[in-house]
Image (cartoon, rainbow, N blue to C red):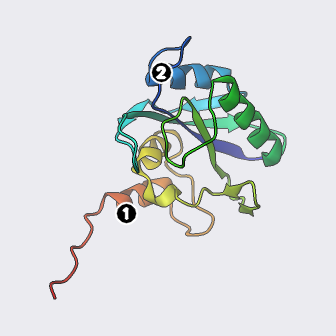
Amino acid sequence: MAIILVAIGSNRRHGRHGSPGRVVQAAIAALPGVVAVSPIFQTVPLGPGTRRYANAVVALDWARGLPELLTQLQAMERDFGRRRGRRWGDRVLDLDIIAAGDAVVHTRALTVPHRELARRRFVLDPLVMVAPGWRHPLSGLTARQLRARALRPKAAPAPR
């Protein structure tokens, strides 16, 4: 199996680990096969949340299948106190498989590469720190190129 890229996020304190940044650090320490880690970025929330997020991306050396990794990541989220609920709600820990080399997977439980990857600066900024040359298997763009596109100013709608 190729190197697996996992996005990590937190915007709620944890009773034992503390601040969201410390939650991300604890999650990184608990992940298996970590071979590269981005810095932790502080980001504003998407959607209705109001608390800032701590975000990072790690590269894992994972020899088993993606379904097994997904199961392990979801168990970690539960162990950290994550409760599934409102979309984009506050969460103690969010772990997402964002890429697995050049693999393309689309099942009910998992989509790889992550379908919102190219639009999310809170994923692209740390991703570029870990795997700048990783190439999106559908678009053919590198992580650096995806981030550059996300940084471009959006054109204002034409006046009517």
Q: Which circle marks residue 149 in the picture?
A: 1
Quadrant of the rendered structure where residue 103 is?
A: bottom right
Residue 45 position (above or below residue 72): below
| Residue at screen point 43% across, 60% down | 145
Residue 102 position (above or below residue 48): below
| Residue at screen point 76% across, 60% down | 108
Image side of residue 122 versus residue 79, left or right = left
Is 101 in front, or is 89? 89
Residue found farthest to the front? 85
Q: Which circle marks residue 35 in the picture?
A: none
Which quarter of the rendered picture does the C terminus lie within? Answer: bottom left
Can the viewer see residue 33 in this picture?
Answer: no
Is 13 in front, or is 111? 13
What secondary structure is found at the residue carrying circle 2? loop
Q: Which residue is mark 2?
A: 13
Q: Residue type at mark 1: give it.
A: Arg
Image side of residue 101 versus residue 107, left or right = left
Quadrant of the rendered structure where residue 136 is?
A: bottom right
What secondary structure is found at the residue carrying circle 1? helix
Image side of residue 19 versus residue 63, left or right = left
Residue found farthest to the bottom? 160
Q: Position of residue 46 (x, y in %)?
A: 40, 49
Image side of residue 29 versus residue 88, left or right = right
Quadrant of the rendered structure where residue 156 is?
A: bottom left
Q: Badge 1: few (under 14), some or many (20 or more) residues near its Cα, within 10 Å?
A: some
Q: Residue type at mark 2: give it.
A: Arg
Is 4 in front, or is 27? 27
Q: Position of residue 29 (x, y in %)?
A: 62, 20
Residue 150 position (above or below residue 88): below
